[in-house]
């Protein structure tokens, strides 16, 4: 009896080990698929951004080019509206849709979502709306994982695991941040830190990042230079900044809810795209620096390129434009826009507080980094992901203590103020909307 039990245990362990190796190989396969799709998406966004910037700059010198710029924007907005109407689940960042499907509350056609999100996201971000590539990349990655599962004949119980792998690979390829892709998939999506989920997702995220690195290189997303470490005597400023970011994060989430309700109540529905077009045209004419996700602003703030008055104006405009853009439900994420808001807040905080406190303003880059980590923690409510993401995006891992302090402080501040994680709120609204549609309300 004892020998038979030993054989059963050995057989069971062998099956487990074999399955573990298999899911790692499947994770690599998903990473190749998701990394290829997201890399193509990221490259397309780079090209269309260059085209939009060229036309807008040329339009300030030549009226005919201004007409071509307007026609380009009209075409992009019409294309975006068509994609959202044809496939409603491609709207927004896509992360709530992925979470909903992993919870078994949403069903999607992976091919339809992948195509609609890919082309809809390119057109939406091409318009100059303040949206990011990370949400679409995560949804594209998750759909690649689902497609891999369906095409390889995997069991449905493995499908969610492979979708998690794809989502991690999508974030890794979007931001060249494989560790953040793993942690986000576990902390925010799967909410399970079991060994087999970790190994599969890590294999997928590393592979996805490897695919993207061949196109975009190994350099970090943000080029920020830090000379010396932040003195311990200034760590109290990280606490103060964390409290401020927690407050801003709560207001940001409420502003997104406001604009989503505002656009949902507009009639006819096409009017929201008209309003978005008008806002983009006005910004292109009078304040073009506010267009797009604002990726380049992070490095400029780190170099102290703006006065505190310019930072204050830019922060206000980007805050309103970001929440307005996301409220339209155009296919696009909020990671990059909110990181830009955090960088602007950190820069503004430094420019105002350091002279009052008698400190040197040479540490502005530190507070730009702290601002990005803190606002991510307060809005998304995934502090571990935020800490690792910002470290990978800047290529700087020597500031984990102050980053952890500001992330924890902003997280607790948002909790105390009654704020809720943005993706949980968005998922609830999405499910409530689905219920109302079924009831014909």
Image (tube, rainbow, N blue to C red):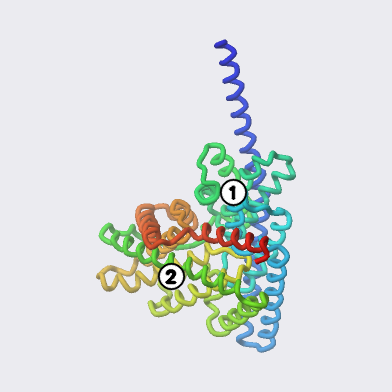
Q: Nearer the viewer, residue 66 or 223?
A: 66
Position of residue 75 in the picture relative to residue 294 (left or right): right
In the image shown, does 143 or 289 lie closer to the viewer? 143
Name the N-terminal-most of marks 2 and 1: 1
Considering the numbered disc 1 on the image, is that residue within a helix, a strand or a loop?
Answer: loop
Percent position of residue 389, x then y: 48, 55
Q: Which mark is residue 325?
A: none
- Side (left or right) of 39 relative to 404: right
Lateral position of residue 356 relative to residue 274, left or right = left
Q: Quadrant of the N terminus?
A: top right
Image spot of residue 382 (x, y percent): 46, 54
Residue lying at 36% horizontally and 59% vertically, measured from the top left? 416
Residues packed near mark 2 inside 10 Å, few (<14), some (14 to 19) or many (20 plus)? many
**Circle 2 residue:** 344
Residue 174 lies in what quarter of the image?
bottom right
Distance in Å between CA atoms under marks 2 and 1: 36 Å
Residue at 64% x, 57% y: name it.
39
Q: Is residue 62 above or below residue 300?
A: below
User: Which quarter of the picture shows residue 315?
Assistant: bottom left
The C terminus - image quarter: bottom right
Crowd band around label 1 with a 10 angstrom C-alpha radius: few (<14), some (14–19), many (20+): few
The answer to whether one can see residue 54 in this image is no
**Coordinates of residue 252 in the picture (x, y in percent):** 47, 68
Q: Is residue 294 above or below residue 25?
A: below
Residue at the image position 66 percent from the left and 60 percent from the top: 89
Residue 399 position, x and y percent, is: 38, 54
Q: SS class of the residue under badge 2?
A: helix
Q: Which residue is mark 1?
A: 103
Q: How many marks?
A: 2
Nearer the observer, disc 2 or disc 1?
1
Q: Is residue 41 visible?
A: yes
């Amino acid at each position: 009896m004892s020998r038979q039990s030993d054989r059963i245990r050995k057989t069971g362990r062998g099956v487990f080990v074999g399955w573990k190796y298999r899911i790692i190989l499947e994770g690599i396969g998903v990473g190749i698929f998701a990394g290829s799709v997201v890399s193509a998406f990221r490259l397309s966004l780079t090209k269309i951004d260059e085209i939009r910037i060229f036309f807008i700059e040329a339009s300030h010198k030549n009226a005919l080019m201004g007409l071509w710029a307007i026609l380009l924007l009209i075409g992009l907005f019409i294309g975006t509206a068509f994609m959202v109407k044809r496939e409603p689940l491609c709207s927004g960042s896509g992360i709530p849709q992925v979470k909903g499907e992993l919870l078994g509350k949403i069903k999607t056609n992976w091919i339809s979502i992948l195509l609609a999100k890919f082309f809809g996201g390119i057109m939406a971000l091409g318009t100059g709306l303040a949206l990011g590539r990370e949400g679409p990349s995560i949804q594209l990655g998750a759909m690649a994982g689902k497609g891999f599962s369906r095409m390889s004949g995997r069991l449905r119980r493995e499908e969610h695991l492979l979708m998690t792998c794809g989502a991690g690979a999508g974030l890794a390829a979007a931001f060249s941040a494989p560790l953040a892709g793993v942690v986000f998939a576990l902390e925010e999506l799967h909410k399970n830190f079991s060994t087999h989920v970790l190994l599969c997702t890590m294999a997928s995220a590393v592979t996805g990042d490897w695919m993207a690195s061949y196109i975009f290189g190994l350099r970090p997303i943000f080029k920020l230079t830090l000379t010396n470490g932040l003195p311990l005597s200034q760590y109290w400023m990280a606490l103060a900044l964390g409290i401020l970011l927690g407050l801003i994060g709560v207001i940001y989430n409420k502003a997104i809810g406001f604009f989503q309700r505002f656009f949902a109540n507009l009639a006819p529905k096409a009017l929201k795209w008209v309003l978005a077009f008008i806002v983009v045209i006005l910004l292109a004419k009078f304040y073009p620096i506010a267009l797009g996700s604002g990726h380049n602003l992070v490095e400029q703030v780190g170099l102290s390129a703006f006065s505190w008055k310019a930072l204050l104006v830019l922060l206000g405009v980007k805050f309103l434009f970001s929440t307005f853009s996301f409220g339209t439900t155009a296919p696009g994420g909020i990671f990059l826009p909110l990181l830009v808001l955090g960088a602007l807040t950190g820069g503004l905080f430094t420019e105002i507080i350091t002279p009052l406190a008698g400190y040197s303003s040479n540490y502005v880059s530190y507070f730009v980094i702290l601002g990005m980590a803190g606002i991510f923690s307060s809005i998304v409510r995934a502090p571990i992901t935020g800490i690792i993401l910002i470290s990978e995006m800047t290529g700087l891992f020597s500031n984990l203590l102050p980053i952890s302090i500001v992330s924890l402080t902003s997280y607790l501040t948002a909790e105390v103020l009654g704020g809720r994680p943005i993706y949980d709120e968005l998922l609830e609204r999405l499910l409530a909307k689905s219920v109302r549609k079924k009831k014909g309300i």
